[in-house]
Image (cartoon, rainbow, N blue to C red):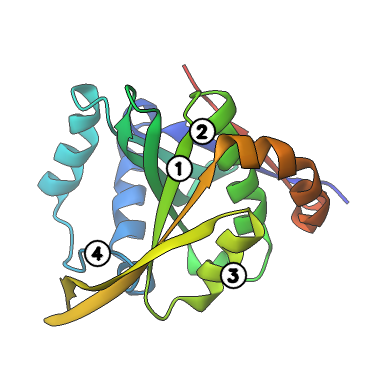
Amino acid sequence: MKKRQITLQKALDICRDDQLALRTLRNKKDCRKWMYTDHIISINEHFQWIENQKIDKSLIVFAIFEGKEVIGMFKINNISWRHKTCDWGYYIDSSYAGTGIGQALEYTTVDFIFNTLNLMKQTVEVMEGNELVLRLHSKFLFKEEGFRRSAIIKNKKRCSYHELSVLRRDWNIGKAKVKTLVKSFKFFDVKIIWK
């Protein structure tokens, strides 16, 4: 069986049509359900967010492609180059649910952050109720650091989220074992285009 080719490309470097496709994904209801902001993102707001990456060195946004189709987004934010830390998050079009792409993507991006960007700690935040993603992160050596009660307002209600992190030393010790658990590498080949 031929592997499906998944490529991450910086949102700044892709064509306008692909940038618009990224906005369409960001505005899908099933995507906004787990984002901190849940309003419909305007074209101007979307392009300003992309343009901000030219000056904001604490933010890197990748569009995720299968072939020539934009299927998701991976965002590294709150990068502290001094302290070598970051936060990140991603989403994939819901039509990919259950395919295993999330595991292949998470393994590749966690390793990229540690061993290409040379950061020491990465943190993810998971909205309360998103148990599937909590279990996914725990497979990749993330440990819960806290539960932020009523930390944000979403749909006019106070919501909570989990905060998890992984350290580079723990990743480098355990990544070979983690990779053996990622069965989706049989089906997906994930590449990050960087620089």
* Residue bearing the label numbered 1: 122
Residue at 28 percent of width and 75 percent of height:
160
For residue 12, which quarter of the picture?
top left
Residue 157 point in image, percent of width and height? 15, 83
Q: How far apart are marks 2 and 1 (CA)?
A: 8 Å
- In the image, is residue 100 above or below residue 77? below
Single out the mark in the foreground, 2 or 1: 1
Q: Which of marks 2 and 3 is nearer the N terminus?
A: 2
Q: How far apart are marks 2 and 4 (CA)?
A: 23 Å
Residue at 18 percent of width and 31 percent of height:
52
* Residue bearing the label numbered 4: 36
Do the residues bearing badges 2 and 3 touch, measured as CB atoms within 8 Å?
no
* Residue bearing the label numbered 2: 113
Mark 3 neighbour density, 10 Å: few (under 14) some (14–19) many (20 or more): few
> Which numbered dot is residue 135?
3
Q: Which of marks 3 and 4 is nearer the N terminus?
A: 4
Residue 26 point in image, percent of width and height? 31, 58
Mark 4 neighbour density, 10 Å: few (under 14) some (14–19) many (20 or more): some
Residue 84 point in image, percent of width and height? 40, 28
Single out the mark in the foreground, 1 or 4: 1
Q: How far apart are marks 3 and 4 (CA)?
A: 20 Å
Residue at 11 percent of width and 81 percent of height:
156
Do the residues bearing badges 3 and 4 touch, measured as CB atoms within 8 Å?
no
